[in-house]
Image (cartoon, rainbow, N blue to C red):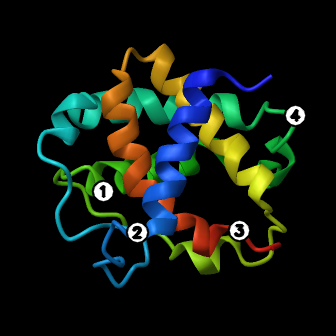
Amino acid sequence: MTHPKTLIALAIATAIAVGGVLAPPAFAQGTAAMATAPAGLYQALGEKPGITRLMDDFVNRVVKDPRIGGHFKDVKPAALKESLTDQICQLSGGPCKYEGADMKSAHADMDINKGHFNALVEVLQSAMDAQGIPFAQQNRLLALLAPMHRDVITIR
């Protein structure tokens, strides 16, 4: 059963993405980076060391998740962790620069549906809980990531 906090976070992230509250991506890389990250989010996530720990935890969980782990079978976990760390660092207002593929290209051949996307959000939230990231800060990060669903979900 889905955790109630996860349902709230998914509802908030989806409402923000679908409702168009967030501006379109500001970076050519297609990372869903907004022109302005929420003030203090980078610090709330523990800056680069905290984000690195979060992405280590997240990737370790996601590759083992029975619902979506298969999507990561050909991925090198260390490279994924590094790329995601840079992406989240940049999105949250940190000094990092994400230089990976845009989300549409990266996920084009992966057959991802809404259920897969939601499972990934649940795994991310579990990792954030384990890292002690407050729920309000989790929602701020999810609000930045939610617009990616347009490029990540390939099966409608």
Q: Which residue is mark 3?
A: 153
Identified at 69% across, 46% down, the residue is 118
Pointer 2 or 3: first along the chain: 2
Q: Is residue 30 left or right of residue 109?
A: left
Can residue 57 be seen from the camera position used here?
no
Q: Could you tell me the amino acid type at mark 2?
A: Ala
Separation of marks 2 and 3 at Cα, in angstroms: 14 Å
Pointer 1 or 4: first along the chain: 4
Q: Could you tell me the amino acid type at mark 4?
A: Pro
Separation of marks 3 and 4 at Cα, in angstroms: 18 Å
Look at the numbered discs 1 and 2 and tell me whether their residues touch, using CB distance below 8 Å. yes
Examine the image and state in which quarter residue 14 appears: bottom right
Q: Could you tell me the amino acid type at mark 3?
A: Ile
The N terminus lies in quadrant: top right
Q: Which residue is mark 1?
A: 91
Residue 106 position, x and y percent, is 63, 72
